[in-house]
Structure formats: structure tokens, C-alpha cells
Image (spheres, helix red, strand yellow):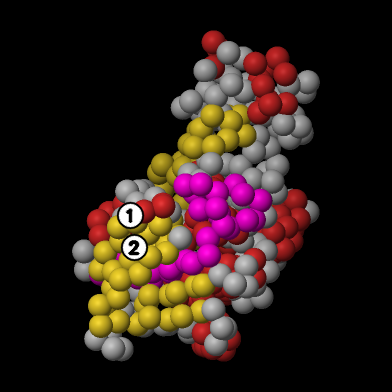
Amino acid sequence: MNASNKKILVIGGGMSGLTAALEAAETGAQVVVVEKSPYLGGRVAQLNKYFPKLCPPTCGLEINFKRIKNNPDITFYTMTDVTQITGQAGDFNVTLNVRPRYVNDKCVACNKCAEVCPVERVNDFNYGLDNNKAAYLPFDMAFPYQYVIDMSVCLGEACKKCVKACEYNAIELDMAPQTVNLNVGAIVVAGGWNLYDATKIDNLGFGQVANVITNMQMERLAAPNGPTGGKIQRPSDGAEPKSVAFVQCAGSRDENHLPYCSYICCMASLKQATYLLDQDPEAQATIFYIDIRTPGRYEQFYWKVRDRENVELVRGKVAKITQAPGDKVEVVAEDTATGNKVRRVFDLVVLAAGMEPSTKSDKIPLAVKYTDEGFIDPTGLPAGIFAVGSMKSPLDVAKSVQDGTGAAIKALQSLVGR
């Protein structure tokens, strides 16, 4: 393919966006990837393991990052927002706002800036389970492998300890935002998803009851590069839990929150039960569910986990979660199989919080048709613009990758046809 005078813009640097970008660029198209966070990889980078191989995400991400480095036809911008899109298929004019990183390309990730930084911030990569410094590397295999300074907490010119400590002149505290204008022929929208705010679910106690966490926090606790080095521990006291309740549909399939099934939550909780039992075979995992949904070949994984000795499945929606003595957590639910009310106490409760499209809160600067839930309606997209992955509906990693490949083909066809 000869597309030297036309480009594809990919909005979002998660797995579906990276797949679309790489597949298109490796045919010879020029591709620009725009990501709002300081690193590429999206939510997958925050997982301990992912389906279908149950391997660490660094496996797939490392391969993709190497493909990006080795491909001169891919340009990427992190910490960047798309502020304007005008034009039509084959001739879109796009305006980007590149927010300052305050660390330039001379950075070698030596960690000297973080060592001397006197200010801490909530570590959003670990979903608030710990803190890191205002000068920080997002995670140990971040791409780009480059520090960033959170100026919302940095002391700036009043401190400058990081500037003095850096031997490579990589710190620029006066770095300013930049505006970049692009002309592209096609656009792939791969903005990804956000975890539903569990504090909105009043009866489940998140943010009010100690040792109630979300499923993504459980991923970070189990991850070797997480806040506990991969040890599953209670946030309140660091104790290793002997009994853990997994509460399904925390916000999903609820007209007051997310009226749809978030697709991945059942599989995620089954997977996380194996995290617990692999670390402590004597621990007890109890899964409270409405329906267990394991699409396609994943049904066999469900059987395997269900049949483990220390796994209990209780069919019933959780009504209330409250604090119990000793930093334990009480769960009240109805067991619909028996009709009995269940009142149980656990060391830790994990809420299977739902998947919400990023477009629910961060719209694309273009006339795009959205569903009531905030997903993009593909039938309402202008010619030359393609939504991918969880922009259209909740998806797992494997299906997001497949969808990314499909979007690349559509974008290439759009360019060729112009």
C-alpha cells in the first residue's frame, strides 16, 4: 500500500487501539496514536493476568511496544487530548493538545528525581492502594519508559530538587502545552473504558466499609508490580485474607447504574478466585452472582474453577455490605436457590464493578451518535471514522484485539478508496 500522503489517526493507546495502529502501519500506512494518559497499554497494563492464556499482560504489551519502536510509520503522543475534528473522509483536520510531561526525551529512568522528591500523590495506576512521588514512572514496564511530573502536587520552582538531582538535564518545570495540527484520511476511535464508580452504589459499602475493594484493585494486589508485590492483603492492616467474597454485578444490570451486562465481570471474578487459592490453597472464595456468564470456550474455565474444593457459588444478589468487628465485612444476600437469607462475614470483599465507556464522560469533538449508556453507535458514525473495542460495547481483551484488526482493515479500505 502507498499511503505516504495520507494518515490514520487512532484515538486511544489501549489494546484495541494499538492493534489497529500496528496492523495498519505494517501494511505501509502512516499512523498517529493519541493517548491521554502518560503511557500506552490502557487498562490491560493494570491487569495481573488476562484471558485467554492467563498470562501477564507484559507478554503481549512488550511485543507490541517493540513493534512500535521498530516501525517508522507509527508516531504516538501521550498525555494528549483531541480537541477538534473537522472535515470529511479522506481529509480530516485534527487539533491535538499535548499536555506537558515536564520531563524531556533525555530521561533514562534513573529514578533520581523520585528519590529526592518530597511530595507524594495518590497512585492512580494502583487505583489508590498506595502513593508514589510527584515525579514518577507510571509502572515498571511503562512505554514510553520515561518519568512524568504531576504538577498538581509538585512544588515547582519553590523546590526544584528533581532538577538538581537529574544528571541528564531531563527535567523542564517550565514545559508548556503544545498544539499539534494533523491532516488524516481516516480515524479509529479506541478510547477504552473506565471502571464504574463503586462509591455510587450505596448499599455495597465501597469507600465506607474497610476492606471492600473493586475487581481492578484486586488485579493490582495480585500483580507482582502492584503495591504489595503480588501478595493479596487486606488494605486496612496488610493481613492475608482467609475468606473472600466476590460480589457480581456491582452496578451492572441495574437501571439505577449500568443497565447492561459488563461482559467481563464473571470471568474476572472466577480468575481472581484462582489468584487467591493459588497463593493460599486453604483460603475460601465465595462468589455471589445473579447469573454466571462465560461466553464461548470460557465455559470450561468456569467448570474448572467451580469444581475447586474451596470455591462456593451462591446464586443471589447482595443486598447490603456493612462493617463487622475486627475489620471484617458482613455480606447480606438472598440465596435464590434455597429462598433463605444469607448473612456471612468475610475478611475481604471484592466488588465486580462494571465497565463504562470513556465516552460517557469524555465525548469526541465531533457529531457522533451515542447510545443512552454512552457507547458509540457505529451506525451513526461519519464516513471514514470507525469505533473499536469497548467504544461500542463491553468486550474482553481477545475480542478487542480482533475488533482492532477489523478497524484497521476498514480504515485502510477508506484510504484506498479515496
Residue 80 percent across, percent down from the top left:
51, 41
- The answer, for residue 253, to whether it is visible in the render is no
Residue range of the region highlighted in magenta in the rendering: 227-254
For mark 1, does the 10 Å Cα neighbourhood hold few (<14), some (14 to 19), or many (20 or more) residues? some
Residue sitting at x 42%, y 64%? 346
Among the 4 quarters of the image, the one containing residue 247: bottom left
Rendered location of residue 27, percent (x, y)? 70, 66
Instruction: Using residue 137 as the reference point, say whether residue 254 is left or right of it.
Output: left
Q: Residues within 10 Å of mark 2 (few under 14, many from 20)?
A: many
Q: Is residue 252 magenta?
A: yes
Q: Residue at x 41, y 42 (%)?
A: 83
Residue with the most extreme top position? 158
The answer to whether 383 is drawn above or below residue 43 in the figure is below
- Numbered marks: total: 2
Q: Which residue is mark 1?
A: 323
Contact between labelled residues 1 and 2, with CB atoms less than 8 Å apart: yes
Residue name at image x 64 percent, y 56 percent? 230
Q: Amino acid at mark 2?
A: Glu
Magenta span includes 157? no
Relative to 204, 55 lies left or right: right
Q: Is residue 227 above or below residue 321?
A: above
Residue 336 location in percent, x, y?
A: 28, 85
> What residue is disc 2 on?
330
Q: Name the foreground residue: 13 vs 352.
A: 352
Describe the element under mark 2 as helix, strand or loop: strand
